[in-house]
Amino acid sequence: MNAGVFYAALAYTAWGLMPIFFKQLGAVNPFEVVMHRMVWALVFLLCVLAVLRRWAWLRGVASQPRVLAAFAVSALLLSVNWSVYVWAVHNAHVVDASLGYFILPLVNVAFGFIFLKERPRPGQWLAVAVAATGVLWLAVQAGRLPWVALVLAFTFGFYGLLRKLATLGALEGLTLETLLLAPFAAGLLVWWTWHGQGALVQGDVATLGWLLLAGPITAVPLLLFAAGARRIPMATLGILQYISPSLQMLVGVWLYGEAFESARFGGFGLVWAALVVYSLEGLWIGRRPLSNQN
């Protein structure tokens, strides 16, 4: 139990501090950063598989077109999520990105009802309604929808939905996704390099080092998360997941000086209230005898 909490907390802490890493690549086009992330993540994951000697799953996947198609869609969602996230960090929208991951658990509740025919409890519906009110408040105050937060929440929500139905584990699934994305990413990097453009030609040694680190920075937190998730209850995992957006918001406001006006605080306050309702309801249900949870 303690090891599981440690692994999961470490994973969420790494994700929460991720804006600091991507800020080091502020001179590189966000789309190019994502291309490097795809390529070097695949290289790192293949090295991990080589050490573990876990290759048998590749033969099975190659003969299942539906599995390949499902992972192609999840890979596309992941690429959109990564692109918007890196763009948000580069363009001083870290706080907006944090909002996306604050509302993600509640998006998952709605997706479970719509796509998996799950029956959310009244407390969960209340949390979803309060969070939706918070997002509406932010949209009215800003005069536009908080599109960064919504794109991040919905792309990762759909991604999680597909991965929930998938047959592969975290390591194998991410490897397959990056394997599908990497040829496109590598082709673009080669094209830019051939034409004397991009970080591989114009970047200094430090920039190239940060880009190479994108591989382990992408994969290690996911592996830590998978190790933690196997060892602790979902209710505990649900509480720990707020470490990531909380750190992101603090990094955006205190480290990078992003604005956090009182009007925005009202919308975030509603989202935080929804998360309190969601978390307390989950803990209360988790403590009830199994026979009384239906």
Image (tube, rainbow, N blue to C red):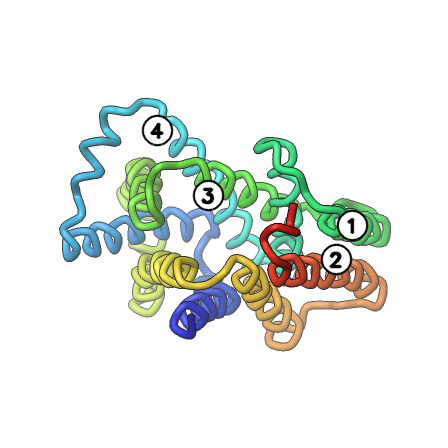
Mark whose residue sits in front, 4 or 3: 4
Q: Write the residue at 79% across / 54% down.
A: 134
- Label 2 amino acid? Ala
Note whether residue 203 is visible.
Answer: no
Residue position for label 2: 274
Q: Which residue is mark 3?
A: 78
Mark 3 or 2: in front is 2
The secondary element bearing badge 2 is classed as helix
Q: CA distance from mark 4 to mark 1?
A: 36 Å
Judged from the image, the secondary structure of the residue bearing numbered disc 3 is helix
Say if 56 sits above or below 271 in the image: above
Q: Residue 195: which quarter of the image?
A: top left
Report the Cα–Cα distance between label 3 and label 2.
26 Å
**Marks 4 and 3, how far apart in space?**
16 Å
Q: Is residue 138 left or right of residue 99?
A: right
Q: Which residue is mark 1?
A: 126
Residue that badge 4 annotates:
67
> Separation of disc 3 and disc 1 at Cα?
29 Å
- Mark 4 → mark 2, Cα distance in angstroms: 35 Å
Residue located 20% across and 51% down the image: 49
Nearest to N terminus: mark 4 or mark 2:
4
Whether pointer 3 and pointer 1 mark residues with C-beta atoms closer than 8 Å, the reply is: no
Q: Is 162 positioned to the left or the right of 186 in the image?
A: right
| Sequence-earlier tag: 4 or 3 | 4
